[in-house]
Amino acid sequence: MSTEALERTKAIATGLFHTANDEGFETAVAALADDAIWWTSMGTKTKAEMIETARGLAMILSGPIAFELGTVTAEGDR
């Protein structure tokens, strides 16, 4: 993967979390492809399942989720 392609991949991945911070997690997940699969500690979830998770979290949390990114791995198809 070229350096340019790697940086583009990182920008796409980090953009999702910046959108979540700025516009809400449900909005960020809604921007994903319809066949997106989200990997969680409890297994995989579809886009629809992640939107439901976002709605459920919004109902029980006292404020929005804020993501703070550290190192990003973008090599390969990850």
Image: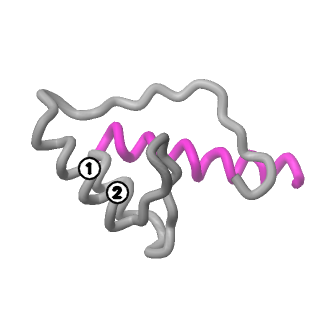
Identify residue for label 1: 54
User: For mark 2, does the 10 Å Cα neighbourhood hold few (<14), some (14 to 19), or many (20 or more) residues?
Assistant: many
* Residue that label 2 marks: 50
- The three-letter amino acid code for the residue at tag 2 is Met
The region drawn magenta spans 1-23
Left or right of 64 in this view: 62: left
Question: Quick one: label 1, few (<14), some, or many (20+) residues within 10 Å?
Answer: some
Q: Is residue 52 above or below residue 73?
A: below
Farthest residue, direction bottom: 34
> Depth check: 58 or 70 in front?
58
Depth check: give the residue in front, 65 or 50: 50
The residue at the point 30 percent across, 56 percent down is 27
Vertical relation: 30 (above or below) 21: below
Q: Position of residue 23 (x, y in %)?
A: 28, 46
- From the viewer's perspective, is residue 65 above or below residue 23? above
Q: Position of residue 3 (x, y in %)?
A: 85, 46
Q: Nearer the viewer, residue 32 or 11?
A: 32
Q: Main secondary structure of the magenta part?
A: helix
Residue 2 position in % (x across, y down): 89, 52
Which quadrant of the view contains residue 20? top left
Mark 1 to mark 2: distance in Å? Answer: 6 Å
Under mark 1, the amino acid is: Ala
Q: Is residue 22 magenta?
A: yes
Residue at horizontal 45 percent and vertical 64 percent from the top: 32
Q: Residue furthest right?
A: 2
* Image quarter of the N terminus: bottom right
Asked whether the residues under the numbered discs 1 and 2 touch, taking CB atoms below 8 Å apart as contact, a structural biologist would say: yes
